[in-house]
Amino acid sequence: MKYKNTKTGAIIETSTKVSGENWKPFTGKESEEKKTPSKKQQANKAEGDSKDDAQEGTE
């Protein structure tokens, strides 16, 4: 079962019961969507056009 921490937004999957005031059962697909980068991010990475590359040589 998946649980989401309402304070931090962390999502975990475990076979045991989770207790605590900030942990609630999670049934949405939000976690899977966040794991997959957008098509634009994938295209930029393939072209080497990431934010890290933008600051190259500015030191």
Image (cartoon, helix red, strand yellow):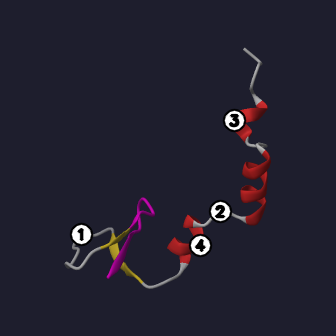
Which badge, 4 or 1, comes first in the chain's sequence?
1
Quadrant of residue 55 in the image? top right
Whether tag 4 and tag 2 are in contact, CB under 8 A, the answer is no
Whether tag 3 and tag 2 are in contact, CB under 8 A, the answer is no
Quadrant of residue 53 in the image? top right
Label number found at residue 29:
none
Residue 9 part of the magenta-drawn span: yes
Q: Secondary structure at mark 4?
A: helix
Pointer 3 residue: 52
Disc 3 residue type?
Answer: Asp
Q: Secondary structure at mark 1?
A: loop
35, above or below 49, in the image: below
Q: What separation in Å lies between label 4 and label 2 (alpha carbons)? A: 8 Å
Label number found at residue 37:
2
Q: Secondary structure at mark 3?
A: helix
| Whole-percent x, y for residue 39 in the image | 75, 65
- Judging depth in this view, the residue of 30 and 22 nearest the camera is 30
| Whole-percent x, y for residue 33 in the image | 59, 72
Pointer 1 residue: 20
Q: Secondary structure at mark 2?
A: loop
| Whole-percent x, y for residue 38 in the image | 71, 64
Q: What separation in Å lies between label 4 and label 1 (alpha carbons)? A: 26 Å
Q: Residue, x 28% and y 70% (percent of image)?
A: 21
Pointer 4 residue: 33
Q: Dot 1: few (<14), some (14–19), or many (≥20) neighbours within 10 Å?
A: few
Q: What separation in Å lies between label 3 and label 4 (alpha carbons)? A: 23 Å
Whether tag 3 and tag 4 are in contact, CB under 8 A, the answer is no
